[in-house]
Image (cartoon, rainbow, N blue to C red):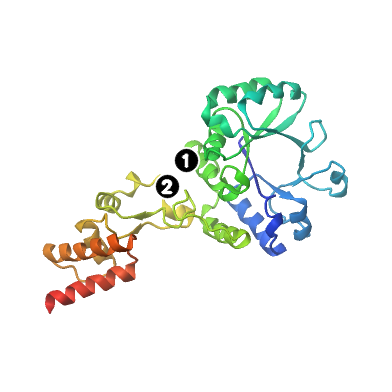
Amino acid sequence: MLRIIDNTLTGFDHCLPSKEELQLFCRLLTEIGIDAIEISLSAYERMEQLPEEGKYILRMDYLEDMAEYPGFYRYTCHFYDNLENMIPEIQINDTRELIKLRALNHCKELRIAGLDDLMCNSSDKAMEEIRKSLPNTKIILNPENTYHCASALAVQWLLSYGSDATVSYAGHNNNGATEEVMMALRLAARHKTGKDFTVLPRLTALYEGITGKIIGNKKPVIGKSIFKVESGIHADAMSKNPAIYEAYEPACVGGRAELVIGKHSGSKAVRMKLEELKLPVPDDEGIQRILDFIKGICAVNRSSLCDEEFAEIAVKVGANERG
């Protein structure tokens, strides 16, 4: 059984929000299928109490804190001994350091953080070495994202080598992105298909509000523009068979497909947008005039058009024809 730990709430100490926002963040993570939520001591103290839903892991700097904060599903700390409910962690930043793992084969459970360079070498060979070095240990892989491959490494580990990984929402904490890993597992392994990904826009808005970071429009799974289609051949195919270009339905992550008109659009896309907005559809020459006008505007502005801008241009060109 695959197990996903989200540790986003260990990285909010510099921007701690209200307890209500922290509790909502936890509830939404649980709704998308996260198995355990790791939080910092500061976040826990701000929350005052944990939501009833979900399992929680407390990240500690000192083992002594474990006795002061009972009741957690697990605890985690940089310590390599077998303590009840403790997940020890080791940082390995270079695959050449994997030999260190052989000294830890007494651990029942171990989280390995780092390994940024796995994709720069043979990731399969390295993951196999990890597994062979710790044959009796439950290994939790927490790949970091220096080379922008952490999500892919987490998925590769979960599909072929292990059952546990730690990630962060939107790749916070320089980790793999929770939403990317969860979606990849849903598509590749039918993992937790009954969980509700439509809350992702709420989770993203909450994350942006807490951290002050703006999620990129093209960010996989949660970017606001990932379902916008501009070029003509794509627009035509999307109208006939969206599955050609969409690995999953936009609605399942709270989004929707949107036809965007820009400098790469063709006459087919212009016609479709006119019909979508219930505007008069001229003959082929009229559509070409609208398209020429649009290409000129978009080339100057270096951006596509919103629906209001497109409608204004269509009406303006139509009025000029009649005039």
Screen quadrant of the N terminus: top right
Residue 288 position, x and y percent, is 16, 62
In the visual, does 271 lie left or right of 18? left
The vertical placement of 68 against 139, above or below, is below
| Residue at horizontal 70 percent and vertical 64 percent from the top | 18
* Residue closest to the eye, 196 or 171: 171
Quadrant housing the C terminus: bottom left
Q: Nearer the viewer, residue 36 or 140?
A: 140
Are dots 2 and 1 in contact, CB under 8 Å? yes
Mark 2 crowd level (few <14, some 14–19, many ≥20, 10 Å Cα): some
Residue 184 visible in the current orientation: yes
Question: Label 1: how many residues lie within 10 Å, few (<14), some (14-19) or many (20+)?
Answer: few
Q: Which mark is residue 248?
A: 2
> Residue placed at 74% from the left, 23% from the top?
105
Among the 4 quarters of the image, the one containing residue 266: bottom left
Mark 2 lies on a secondary structure that is loop
Q: Is residue 136 visible?
A: no
Check the image and report above or below for 198 versus 112.
below
In the rendering, at what x and y percent does residue 243 appear? 35, 46
User: What amino acid type is highlighted by mark number 1?
Assistant: Leu
